[in-house]
Amino acid sequence: MAQSNQAFTNIRQAVNQIIVGQPVLIEQLIVALLAGGHVILEGVPGTGKTLLAQVLARLIQADFRRIQLTPDILPADILGTNIFDLNTRSFTLKKGPIFTQILLADEINRTPPKTQAALLEAMEEQQVTLDGESLPLPPLFWVMATQNSLEFEGTYPLPEAQLDRFLFKLVVDYPEAKAEKQMLLNSQGNSTSRRLDLAKLKPIANVEQVLQARQEVRAIKIADNVVDYVLNLVQKSRKHPDLALGASPRSGVAWLQASKAYAWLNNREFVTPDDVKAVAVPLLRHRLILKAESMLDGVQIEGVVKGLLNGVSVPR
């Protein structure tokens, strides 16, 4: 466990050197990778969301495909299609970009619901059905989706059923002044060009190590009282006066898995209530829906989550 853990600690440090000023975000992203949960990256343009995905894929030597989602993208452009070959008089499957290990769905809210729905089966069941045939996806299959937080014109917000399939929603904020200055200096240095040469990045781990780490994460112990703690939090969210929609049963399962991954990354063989708290905000911020009157009152989801954590007794 220690050797595997060290590899992911090194990955975290390497990404921190490139995407400066976002250490918590990077830690949460690696937790999601270890838990096998898909991620939404939300932030203003130019904050390195796409670069973050490319760097992480390179460091673990994973196959990487990027889809720039636009209003005219069709499901077949993602999944693939059967093409009739006139020479052989038979259909040949042309696989789409979804058949990869890490998929970056760039600006997912810019494509219509019909195309967004093309990802549902793949994200939940790790397979794609084309013309009645189920085709498995790679064991690592991991989706990272980006969306801008400011542009609402011409966008299609993800429905709740699809949002619930993402483990985390991570908010990529502006870096602090010190970190942003370092970014500016890096862009002017002789050793790095304005555009990072990803081919020069030295891999730190490989796909087999990621899959082995996921097995170790699943083996992390979790006591009954910690399971009850998560259950109480989930059930209390459904009765919260500010919420129109609380946490789903799927979110409880995801919460336990993310807590295990966080504990593993921090060299623990068991889950503590602090691990549960550490992943609460990114896990719930896209699953909970505020009532209209609460939104008008300026209530924020992050505040609701912190209130839930403060309102449920911590097991000892």
Image: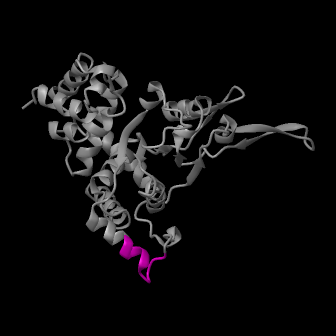
Name the spot of residue 61 as percent of width and height, x first.
49, 60
159, above or below 154, in the image: above
Q: Is residue 98 above or below residue 22?
A: above
Locate residue 237: give its quadrant: top left
In the rendered image, which quarter is residue 77 located in? top right
- Up the image or down, 277 lies above or below 179; here it is above
Look at 59% across and 44% down and name the residue there.
Answer: 69
* Residue, far right: 87
Q: Would residue 186 be seen by someone viewing this image from the given angle?
A: yes
Residue 259, x across and y down, in percent? 26, 39
Say left or right for 227 vs 219: left
Q: Residue at x 27, y 38 (%)?
A: 281
Compare residues 127 and 196 and report the one nearer the observer.
196
Q: Check the image and name the residue furthest to the bottom.
A: 190
Q: Tell me residue 9's x, y (percent).
A: 29, 59
Q: Where is 99 relative to 194, above or below? A: above
Picture coordinates of residue 22 (x, y %)? 31, 57
- Left or right of 149 on screen, residue 238: left
Q: Which residue: 53% across, 38% down?
A: 153
How many labels were placed on the picture?
0
Farthest-out residue, front: 296
Q: Quadrant of residue 253?
A: top left
Determine whether, in the image, residue 44 is placed left or right of residue 241: right
Residue 92 lies in magenta, yes or no?
Answer: no
Give the image's coloring scheme.
Answer: one colour
Asked if the magenta segment contains residue 185, the reply would be: yes
- Is 123 positioned to the left or the right of 301 in the image? right
Q: Is residue 214 in sight in this rendering?
A: no
Q: Which residues are magenta?
A: 184-193
